[in-house]
Image (cartoon, rainbow, N blue to C red):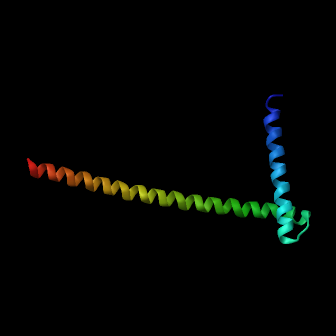
Amino acid sequence: MRIVRPYGFGIVLVGVGVAYYVRRRSAETGLGYFDVLKQLPGEARKYWDDAGRRGKLALQDGLSAARRREDEVVRAIAAAGGAEDDAS
């Protein structure tokens, strides 16, 4: 019984979210509730794909920035090591 409550709460939240979306989208577009519900899977897929694409781009940008920073650190260490060798 304890596990049913969190799932029930989640289902209610999703239902409220979908109802809000359908009502807002219907007001924006002038379509009926049923027509908006029919378009919902396509809209969800579009947003899911867009989020995945943006996530991949963010990961690539982050990895590029990390590589650049690593190169800077390596050059700084090499420069500091060269300066110590000259001082000896």
Left or right: 72 with respect to 15? left
Residue 10 percent location from the top left of the image: 79, 42
Furthest-bottom residue in view? 30
The residue positioned 79% from the left and 31% from the top of the image is 3
Residue 42 percent location from the top left of the image: 78, 64
Q: Quadrant of residue 50?
A: bottom right
The residue positioned 84% from the left and 71% from the top of the image is 29
Residue 78 percent location from the top left of the image: 22, 53
Quadrant location of the N terminus? top right
The residue positioned 27% from the left and 56% from the top of the image is 75
Left or right: 60 with respect to 44? left
Q: Quadrant of residue 48?
A: bottom right
Q: Quadrant of residue 70?
A: bottom left
Left or right: 25 with respect to 54? right
The residue lying toward the viewer, choosing from 19 and 1, is 19
The residue positioned 64% from the left and 59% from the top of the image is 51
